[in-house]
Image: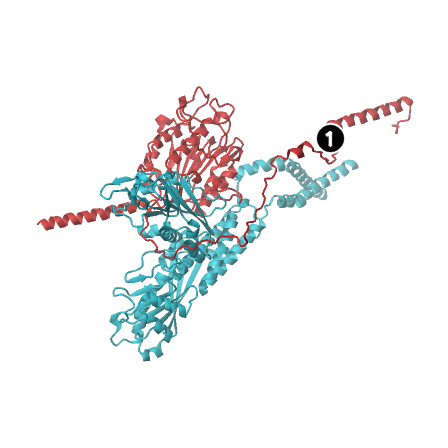
Chain colours: A cyan, B red
Amino acid sequence: MATTEVERRRGQLAALSIAAVVILIGVPLWWRTTETYRAWLPVSQIQELANLQLQLSADVEVVFARGTVTPEQQKKVPLTLTQDDEHVVDEDTALRYRYETRYRTATIMEEDALNQPTAAEADLSLHTLSESPCGSLVVYVIPESSSLLPEDVDVYVGQRRTALLRIGAQTRVGRTLEQLLSHLEPRVKQVLQVMSFSHTDITAALSDRVRLSPGNKESIADSMRAFKSSPGYEITFSLLNPDPKSHRLHWDIEGAVQTYIQPLLRKLAPLANFSIDSQTLYYAMLGVNPRFDSSRSAYTLNSDSLAHVINPVEARLGSNAASSNPVLNFLLYVPDAHHSPLHINDHKKQEVPSNAFHSPRWGGIMVYNVNDFYGPEAAFPVDINIDMAKVMGVFLAQLRLLLGVQSSAPPPRFLVAPCSSAGIADWELDRLMWSRSVENIATATTTITSLAQLLDQIGNIVINDNIAQQVSSAVTSLQLAVAELESGNLRFALQYSKEAILASERAFFDPSLLHLLYFPDDQKFAIYIPLFLPMCVPILLSLLKIVSDARQRRREKHAKAD
Amino acid sequence: MKILTLWSLFSTYLLASSLNIENHAAQFFSSGHTNNWAVLVCTSRFWFNYRHVANTLSVYRSVKRLGIPDSHIVLMLADDMACNHRNPKPATVFSHKNMELNVYGDDVEVDYRGYEVTVENFLRVLTGRLPPSTPRSKRLLSDDRSNILIYLTGHGGNGFLKFQDSEEISNVELADAFEQMWQKRRYNELLFIIDTCQGASMYERFYSPNLMALASSQVGEDSLSHQPDLAIGVHLMDRYTFYLLEFLEDIHPASKTNMNDLFKVCPKSQCVSTPGHRTDLFLRDPGSVLITDFFGSVRKVEITMETINLTDPIEQVEQSPVNGELQKERNSYVDQLPVSEIIHQKPKQRDWHPPDGFILGLWTLILLVFFKTLAFQETAVGSKPPYRVQ
């Protein structure tokens, strides 16, 4: 009898110890070995960034030339004025534009410079006096009687960061300083909108974040035309020669790129890396048949058929397959001898002077007629040297459009200086830098917040240390970029925003973040039940038996006691 | 009087021409996309699934004909039918009986072939999470102004699509992948076409905007194949894709057919199954969406109005070198097949492993026999057993 008691005790002890091992060691061990490694992410900072409050600061210096203010008013001119414009774009995004305006009168040397015969020369001599830092502007207010600007022009926008503003006639008689300043303020703001940033530009840059309802057709076209911000671009120049038997073409592409394109790309270096290559394609025809126009004795391509020109050619263009950067293609097509000269017509059936067209986010095509270079008795094939200055003039204009340098038409009574040899004016560069910084910041914040949301939703994804590090560095760069934008350091803001977008893209597109297997709940049960149930059932039953035995014994004890 | 009529004619002409331009501009930019991509996937292998490969290749051919270049098409074929041992006409894949139309042709560019077509690779292509060494042709480099066409075909069921007979993708995963594409703005509009059994179940779970979906059959129905070819011995096409192709053959790059016509393709009388479509997530009205918005690649074009006047002459690129003679380096090719090394190879030193398999069994047998005979000897001699039961 004692042995059964001993054995029963031993049995109970065994069951209890097995249960203890299972619960105390087994369950934690299973939990630790099946949990996914998730490195720590700065979720609270990401939440803060999701609510984007951007402040853009621009510095304007308004310089009064002689004849615009009276000497008494000169002494009372306030030194600085700060203005804030708030715009709420949607519930997560708010913009504030801060304009810091400094007023002063012109120095003797500036007066001399403003006495030049034309606005362009005045602009040139004003540069030699001072260099404005990136992101700031200088507006020279010149009197009504000045002969610098032609009659119908009130504002001249220079090639660097200066503008000449002519005071209107209506503020002549008995005006006070306050009247003068209040008259000037909207006009200066208009100049700022052209030269620095305007609300439409900035909201267009935020298109990744905020899907705005489409405005007018021009704004849609503008937003679709330029390439999105990218760390690098590839530019390919191709010469298409469909008729090598008649034309032997020579183009000095290396020299032309070095002289005409590289200055622009050097200036744009803070924005992105550019790589250029060129190629020549023989026997590449356009996919469209041109029509012969007897009134002009030339072949014509009308604007409707231009859209179908690109596809057959694109299949034959090679590309530098090493990187995933967007590619800009510039094609120079020399028509064959039987279809020369070839002109492009616009919607109104008029000849296009540049004989070129471009496709948004793809590139441009120019048709170069060579029939003037030789007479009818020439011996084929004819050697032809292509005039690269003309060609590059067109390609440079198209490049400016496609990179987003060119903006929409200036407001009336504005005269914008023609492009310098560098291809881009300083204020255009500033403008591009503002919109690219905002675009980068907007894209990076959207990426980071959606990544955080994704990782939160799906509990099974492993978050490695490198992803966490990229996310942290992206968050830090974003915070720095927003701070630099607030203080008006445009170059640093752009640099930080580029770092932020690189880090966030790398984190989002990391190959290890693929949540491949979707486990519905019934499949999870189906996997775990055959493993755990056979083990748990005997333990549970023996525990139940122990409990029922203990209860029975207590009842017996009670019965005995009674 | 004459002046009045002249003036009214003039003004109507002006009005008409300006309206025309306005219409033109409106039509031009009504779709909001600047480039087109296509992802065409065939998910089944084995010879009897010939029709799935033919489906995908026919859609590929139509899409190329309408203008999308190979660099913008990601073609995934899970098996190679053209060079299959059982193909009586090697290097061809026919889509019509009596071998009328060879869809394999000369310029087919398959980006993912054979065992590379997996659920993982498909999702990686869609979400963009490819390893950095992936070449450009295997990536979907779309941006926020791309219209993407996705075509899937294979064997499917209620809520899943079978890949390679060994794994499956569920409709939840597909919907999540599209949502990730939307979060990163990897598409402007997306058209999803699926030709499998119970195909409509695959688009039930979509929740991202700007998605339009078509399927060849409803939940509970099977998609059927079209016609067998007796010479090749398998079914050549599926019904839905066959009639879809007939419809697409009438489309040319400038045609103005819209999506409502595409929904009417293959009614129940021809298809036996009921094709379905889903447009509630799409922002535009399907009647205003052109077929060529997804299947073709009609570029937007603008005339270049401005040019820049460049006056600097081209500076000559400096010629090298500084010293008179050019340094010539002798370069030589690496030996592609080092024959001499292979012939005079010494036998490799292999690491010692403990014996396994047959040798182990043999030694075990020998040892057993040895000890058995030893024991036998001992008992025969009469030694005492180690213990005795009392």
Chain under numbered label 1: B
Q: Nearer the viewer, residue A511 or B209?
A: A511
Quarter of the image for the C terminus of chain B: give it. Answer: top right
Please give the count of numbered marks on the rendered protein: 1
Q: Outermost residue toward the bottom?
A: A72
As rendered, which of B258 and A415 lies closer to the eye?
A415
User: Does A451 sit above or below residue A421?
Assistant: above
Of A20 and B352, the residue lying toward us? B352
Residue pictured at 49% horizontal, 59% vertical: A479
Left or right position of A329 against B46: left
x and y percent of residue B320 in the render? Answer: 51, 52
Q: Position of residue A150 (x, y in %)?
A: 27, 65
Question: Label 1: how many residues lie within 10 Å, few (<14), some (14-19) or many (20+)?
Answer: few
Answer whether residue A482 is visible to the viewer in this image: no
Residue A222 seen: yes
Find residue B140 and report its horizontal and vertical position in percent.
Answer: 46, 42
**Which residue sits at x=52%, y=50%?**
A506
Q: Is residue B124 left or right of residue A307?
A: right
Q: Secondary structure at mark 1?
A: loop
Q: Three-letter amino acid code at disc 1?
A: Asp
Identify the residue at image location x=41%, y=41%. Answer: A281
Disc 1 marks which residue?
Answer: B356
